Image: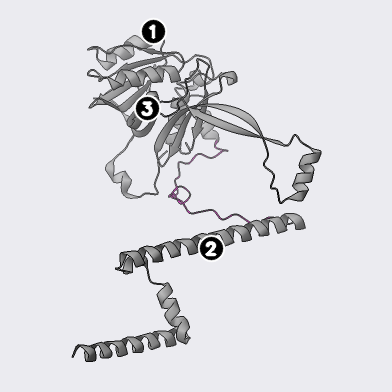
Amino acid sequence: MGTGKRKKSDGREVEAASAAAERGGGGGEGVKEKKRRTLPSMIKNKEKRSAVHAELKREKRIEKRKKAKAQEAALQRAIELGEEPPLKKVPRTIENTREPDETVCKPDDEELFAGNDADEFCEVLKQDVSPKILITTCRFNSTRGPAFIEELLSVIPNAHYYKRGTYELKKIIEYAKNKDFTSIIVVHTNRREPDALLIINLPDGPTAHFKLSNVVLRKDIKNHGRPTSHMPELVLNNFTTRLGHRIGRMVQSLFPHDPNFRGRRVVTFHNQRDFIFFRHHRYIFETKEKKVDPKDKAAKGAKEKNASQQKVIARLQECGPRFTMKLISLQHGTFDTKGGEFEWVHKPEMDTSRRRFFL
């Protein structure tokens, strides 16, 4: 009985295979095409599945190599013929497919430049006043809070740490105004970890509240460097909207604008998808000889003629700390929880689209 049933099912499979072959336009080609389309996840046998997966990966790798060689050959041919090289394909990313935003700054925006000359940061950025920063903690700080602040003091020049004690923030703001401080940074800690940053520009604001995450201290960074006392260079990336431009100018006002290039220090604030990544590096330029392919006789002959073929490379060493900031709110004036007017506040309903960014 079992054999008869098996024969019937085999007959049905043959009929189905022949029908698929007819639809595909060929006898054996349709069946081969069907086998080729079989995904590894559809195979129950583990060994067979892993073998098919490895074969698919190998085929993809070979195909990728062929495409790269064809593109390189087309580029070389265009250079030899003096034609324009073929355009490089730009991959689709969340950044370059972001939703259109009216507040994106344009290079010919006269209103923006006029606003820059009259905003709260213009005195520091025009170097009429040198930045002077007061750094403090929340009332109940943990052990990692002061360790994080100690590293911030090594990053930001002319920054001073004051213990918070039981003083209210409004009294600290008045004290800082009288002592000619230009900004206040408050590090908030929760469960022994720094989790928020409050930056208050003096004397008239604004006040920015950032959420802190992924804090890594210098001692936890492998092969870290030791920062020197030279004035650092400042790099700001991707602050493209009006709000982002304002946050960028607030960050700029924390650092002096006369970097000492002998120190080779660079501080980076990189904005990506509204997350601001902070990094602190030292860099060095080195000269190395160009590697010449032994098969390339022309290049080998040129090397013999000109032995000083060298290229300059840049090497980085991270000094720390490392952390990520996300803007929660931007408030007019100095810190005021009751009567403060907010320029921008992040709300949960703003996160409905992955391609909508505000900075």
Query: For the residue carrying disc 2, how many other residues have a C-alpha within 10 Å: few (<14), some (14-19), or many (20+)?
Result: few
Give, as a three-letter code, the residue at label 1.
Lys
Quadrant hosting residue 168: top left
Q: CA distance from mark 3 to mark 2?
A: 42 Å
Secondary-structure class at tag 1? loop
Dot label at residue 63: 2
237 versus 132 height, above or below: below
Location of mark 3 (residue): 220
| 180 in magenta | no
Residue at the farthest top position: 179
Query: For the residue carrying disc 1, how many other residues have a C-alpha within 10 Å: few (<14), some (14-19), or many (20+)?
Result: few
Give, as a three-letter code, the residue at label 2.
Glu
Q: CA distance from mark 2 to mark 1?
A: 67 Å
Quadrant hosting residue 340: top left
x, y percentage for residue 164? 27, 13
305 versus 41 height, above or below: above
Residue found at x 23% / y 92%: 4
Q: Nearer the viewer, residue 184 or 63?
A: 63
Give, as a three-letter code, the residue at label 3.
Asp
Q: In the rendered image, is residue 286 in sight?
A: yes
Residue found at x 35% / y 30%: 215
Question: In the rendered structure, which disc, 2 or 1, sits on the residue that comes first in sequence?
Answer: 2
Secondary-structure class at tag 3? helix
Query: For the residue carrying disc 3, how many other residues have a C-alpha within 10 Å: few (<14), some (14-19), or many (20+)?
Result: few
Residue found at x 35% / y 19%: 149
Q: Nearer the viewer, residue 290 or 82?
A: 290
Location of mark 1 (residue): 179
Which image quarter is the C terminus in?
A: top left
259 versus 299 height, above or below: above
